[in-house]
Amino acid sequence: MLKLLRFGLLTLMTLSAVLPMVAQVRHVTTVNPTSKRSYMEVYEFDYVDIQPQFPGGECALINFINKTREYPYHAYKQRIQGRVLCSFIVGVDGRVGDVRVLRGAGEESLDREAIRVIEKMPKWSVGKVGNHAVPVRVVLPINFRL
């Protein structure tokens, strides 16, 4: 019985030492943004201490998308609507790069327009872990509604 109690206390002490480390786990992925030879670690948006932000905040981001987005002529004539789910990386310098379509709208011209809008974005404020700027992946839907 005494050995079992000691084992329980030892297990409890070990778990109390490990649990703070578990809370600090970050979701980091490796991406290849430019060539087959260069890779970089990218943090996920929800797992950084300070998240990257569009200059002016979320309202400014929506206004930028609405002003920059141009409905493709073919999609407009065919009355095609949809949402393009894109991902991109905000680098340590705030620049937007590695833009990808995660889920298209079913019309390639809408997908291309969503990529064009994201590539025209100005520099964002950088994401940080602690006091260090890190590259962060952002997922953003671009809506096309008539």
Image (spheres, grey):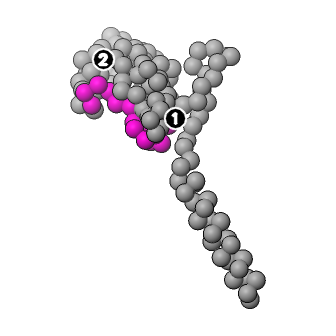
What residue is shown at x 46% (from left), y 24% (from top)?
92
Residue 89 drawn at (x, y percent): 47, 25
Mark 2 Cα shell of 10 Å, populated few (<14), some (14-19), many (≥20): some
Q: Quadrant of residue 124?
A: top left
**What predominant SS class does the magenta segment belong to?**
loop
What residue range appears in magenta?
Answer: 44-57
Q: In this view, does 3 lie to the left or right of 138?
A: right
What residue is shown at x 73% (from left), y 82% (from top)?
4
Determine whether 16 is above or below 141 in the image. Answer: below
Residue 125 visible in the snapshot? yes
Q: Nearer the viewer, residue 40 or 82?
A: 40
Q: What residue type is labelled 1?
A: Tyr
What residue is shown at x 68% (from left), y 16% (from top)?
37
Specify the label residue 43 is tagged with.
Answer: 1
Q: In this view, does 54 lie to the left or right of 28?
A: left
Residue 139 visible in the snapshot? no
Determine whether 51 is above or below 2 in the image. Answer: above
Q: In which quarter of the image is the N terminus?
A: bottom right
- Check disc 1 and report its element: helix, strand or loop: strand
Front position among marks 1 and 2: 1
What residue is shown at x 76% (from left), y 83% (from top)?
3
Determine whether 97 is above or below 136 in the image. Answer: above
Q: Is residue 29 left or right of residue 60?
A: right
Specify the label residue 69 is tagged with.
Answer: 2
The count of marks equals 2
Is residue 46 highlighted in magenta?
A: yes
Q: Quadrant of the C terminus?
A: top left
Residue 42 drawn at (x, y percent): 54, 31
